[in-house]
Image (spheres, rainbow, N blue to C red):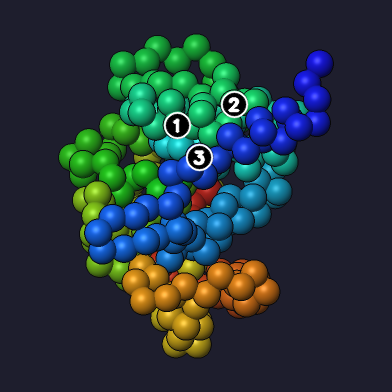
Amino acid sequence: MQNSKEKVQQDKYNFPYHYIPICDDKILKKVQYWGTGHRYLGNIKIIFDLLEKIEFESLIDIGTGDGRIVRELYNKYNDKDIVGVDYYKIAIDLAKAMNPDIADRFMVEDISNKSIDTKYDVVTIINVLEQIEPDKLNNFVFLSSEYLRKDGYFIITVPSDNKEVFGAAYQHFNENKLINLLSRLFYDIDIIYFDNIKSKRLNLFHKLIGGFNGENYIITNRYINKKFIDLYMSKYLYTTKEKCGRIAVICRKK
C-alpha cells in the first residue's frame, strides 16, 4: 500500500517541473510563460458553455494534441464516453504522459484511413481547421462528420480573419467561409464570436502583466492575474463579429 510520502512524490510527476528552469551563458529562466493562455482558457469555457445546452453521452475530440481539452471534459463529464484522437503519435504520447489516469482515452488515428466503428453524439475540433491545407479541408470536415450520429453535434473553434494568418495556419475564417464549409453536411448552424482583440483596456492590462511574450517582465501575483482572467471572461470573452479573435460554431449533422 502506498504511503503518504510516496503519494506526494508520485503526484509531482503530474507535470514535468524539472524541465522548467533553463540556464545558459546569457540567461536564467525559471518559468514558462504563455502570453495568450487566457485565450485558451476562454476557448475551453466556450466549449463548456455550448455543451451545457445539449444532451450527450459520448464525445470525440479530433486533433486533440496534448489532451488538455479531453482532460477538462473528463473532469466534468466523467460519466460520459469521452476520447481524443490525433494524427501525431508524439502528441498522443504527451497526452497519455500528462494524463496517466485516463491514458486509455487517447489514440493515434489518421481519420483519412480509418473505418468508423463507433459513432458519437458530439465531435469537437478545437483550433485545428486552420492547420489543414485548404484543398483538403472539405474532405477533412466530411471525414470528421463520419464519426457523428445523425443529428449529432459538431463543435469547432477557429481563428477569425480579423487577425493575420501566422505560424502553422493556412487560413483564418469568417462567417461566410464557415457556412460554405459546413452547410452541405450540417444544419442549425450557430456562429459564436468570442475573444475580443480590439479592447484597449484589456490589451493595456495584458501588456502590464507581461504581454504576449513576457520578454522584459512577468507579473506572477495570483491576485492580479485572477483579476485579469475574471475581467476577460466576464467582459471580453463573448464579443461581436468586428471585434472577435476567434469564432466557434455548433451545428448538427444532416
The residue where tag 3 is placed is 16
* Residue drawn at (63%, 42%) of the image: 72
Residue 72 sits above or below residue 194 on the image: above
Dots 3 and 2: beta carbons under 8 Å? no
Give x and y (percent) for residue 22: 37, 53
Q: Which residue is mark 1?
A: 94
Tell me what residue is drawn at x 30 percent, y 49 percent.
130
**Sooner in the amino-acid sequence: mark 3 or mark 2:** 3
Q: In the picture provided, is 65 more to the left or to the right than 27?
A: right
Disc 2 marks which residue? 100
Considering depth in this image, is 216 or 201 the residue closer to the camera?
Answer: 216
Quick check: can you spot residue 67?
yes
92 or 63: nearer the viewer: 92
> Is residue 64 in view?
no
| Whole-percent x, y for residue 53 in the image | 70, 49
Q: Which mark is residue 167?
A: none
Element class at badge 1: helix
Name the quarter where the N terminus is drawn: top right
Q: Nearer the viewer, residue 153 or 246?
A: 246
Amino acid at the residue labelled 1: Leu
Residue at 61% x, 73% y: name it.
Answer: 221
